[in-house]
Image: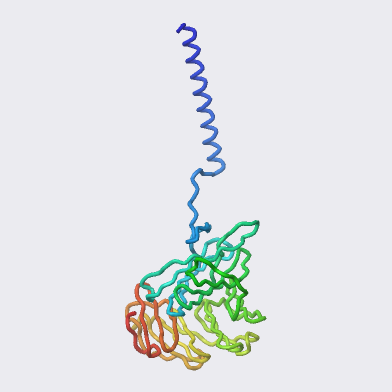
Amino acid sequence: MPRFLSISVVVVLVVVDLVLLAWLALWMNDQRNTGESTAQPSPATTEGGEETAGTPGGDVRLEYSGGTLIRITQGSCTGETRPMLETSADLGQSYTEMAVPVIDGGDGESVAVSAVLSATAESPTELTILATNGNCEVSQYVTADAGASWSAEPPSGWYIGPTGEEVFGPETVTEPGCVARRLWAFNDLDLKVLCDDLSLRGSSSGGDEWISLGEVTDATDVLMTDVYEGVAVATTPECASQVLVTDDAGSSWEAIGCVSAEARVDHLLGSSSQLIAVGADSTWLSADGGATWAVG
């Protein structure tokens, strides 16, 4: 090859290398300035394969019905976190995640519900839940196949709204005077709510008026089993999960037993004939209104 041709080839290759290096430097600088990354996080998917944005978050609540313990990670109706729904047929020894309903998110896009507010079960595979869309509007959803499919219907009965500051009932909306975390509607007139500070408020007028019903010092949870009767657990120096009962709608409480001297109880569920206490690592059962307990 002639000497001048070899020199020309070398010059061309050097110029190409310089151009490539300059382009790479500009691209890297653009990436730093925009804060963008080529790596994208993998979205979570429901069992049905639909993508759901975000990670589970929000209040974690337990419900018990139909022989099923339901663990609800509430999510956020405005979308900061997503909900998660889990069921247990063995009193919390193991949980199975259930896909939440997928709804029309607008513009033809299918999205998961943004928050799950409450749930009841007929069995571990048959659930009715209250959930919100991205506009915080509440609907009721029913599944008979462990979440493989859901049917939507208008909400029925009484329920706490997404913010906790309102209680909705048949053709009525009422404000209990606190942020409610639990609700008991014994009929269309007698209502009780457990507030975020674990105090009780009640209405005997279908929500027209609410009054304070008192509170239990150092309570960890409260369960009303009737209009006037209820059970609470509280931490005391002698017992990490002291059991107290009321028969006057929470005006006074009497200590009757201890679930565990060392372990705290975070959730109290069930009925007066079958109480369920759930702690971080254990579950206890009582068949005598809370006087005695056995590990479940």
- Residue 98: x percent and y percent? 47, 67
Q: Nearer the viewer, residue 183 or 26?
A: 183
- Residue 159: x percent and y percent? 58, 78
* Image quarter of the C terminus: bottom left
**Count of labels shown?**
0
Tell me the colour scheme of the image.
Answer: rainbow
**In the depicted structure, whether residue 206 falls above or below residue 196:** below
Tell me which corner region of the image, top left, top right, bottom left or bottom right, holds residue 165. Answer: bottom right
**In the depicted structure, whether residue 195 falls above or below residue 49:** below
Question: Does residue 70 appear to the left or right of 77 in the view shown?
Answer: left
- Residue 162: x percent and y percent? 58, 71
**In the depicted structure, whether residue 62 falls above or below residue 16:** below
Please name the residue shown 61% across and 63% down the image.
Answer: 134
* Image quarter of the N terminus: top left
In the rendered image, the residue lying farthest to the right is 171
In the rendered image, the residue lying farthest to the bottom is 247
Question: Does residue 165 appear to the left or right of 2 in the view shown?
Answer: right
Question: Does residue 145 appear to the left or right of 279 in the view shown?
Answer: right
Q: Nearer the viewer, residue 220 or 293?
A: 293
Please name the residue shown 45% across and 69% down the image.
Answer: 86
**In the depicted structure, whether residue 105 falls above or below residue 180:** above
Tell me which corner region of the image, top left, top right, bottom left or bottom right, holds residue 33. Answer: top right
Tell me which corner region of the image, top left, top right, bottom left or bottom right, holds residue 64. Answer: bottom left
Please name the residue shown 37% across and 70% down the image.
Answer: 94
- Residue 201: x percent and y percent? 56, 84
